[in-house]
Amino acid sequence: MTLRKLHRMIAVVFAPFILLTAITGGMLLWRHTGAYEFGTMNVLFGLHNWEIVANYVGTILAVGMMVTALTGLTLWAQVIGNKRRAAQRKAKKK
């Protein structure tokens, strides 16, 4: 399996969870404004850190996010390296 396929597969699997974490995190930024009740805030905290499901689920999702980020950065570095090498070859031909 290529790195690009691995990155795509992991990203597709973890994207909904990352989105939910981002949405609940954004909502929690407003917790001190009185925008919602204490019970709602507890549910948001539980969803945001995944304690509402199980303690280990948050750890699995964190690892998935890290792997997605690391494979994405690796792919980005490969693209930049390929562009530089292509530019160097083009410059040598002139």
Image: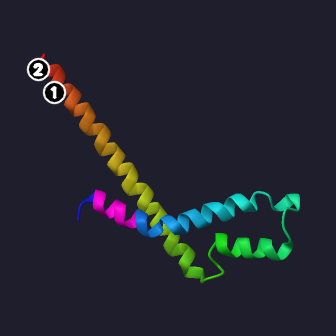
Amino acid bearing label 2: Lys
Q: Residues within 10 Å of mark 2 (few under 14, many from 20)?
A: few
Magenta residues (range): 4-10
Element carrying mark 1: helix
Q: Assign the magenta stretch its main secondary structure.
A: helix
Instruction: Please report contact status of discs 1 and 2: CB closer than 8 Å, yes or no.
Output: yes
The numbered dot on residue 24 is none
Residue picked out by circle 1? 89
Q: Position of residue 94 (x, y in %)?
A: 13, 15
In the image shown, does 62 or 52 lie closer to the viewer? 52
Which residue corresponds to the image point at 55% horizontal and 80% vertical from the top-left? 56
Which quadrant of the view contains residue 20? bottom right
Task: Between residue 61 and residue 23, name the one nearer to us.
Answer: 23
Q: Quadrant of residue 47?
A: bottom right
In the rendered image of this protein, does residue 31 appear above or below residue 60? above
Residue in the image at 31% along x and 38% along y: 80
Secondary structure of the residue carrying tag 2 is: helix
Tell whether position 50 is magenta: no
Going 34% across and 50% down the picture, which residue do you hit? 74
Q: Against 17, is 72 above or below? A: above
Give the alpha-carbon distance from disc 1 to disc 2, as whole Å. Answer: 6 Å
- Looking at the picture, how far across and down is residue 60, in whole percent? 49, 74
Residue to which mark 2 is pinned: 93
Amino acid carrying label 1: it is Arg
Q: At x 74% / y 62%, what residue is drawn? A: 28
The question of residue 6 being in magenta is answered with yes
| Left or right: 52 as drawn, with respect to 17 | right
> Which quadrant of the view contains residue 78?
top left
Q: Quadrant of the N terminus?
A: bottom left
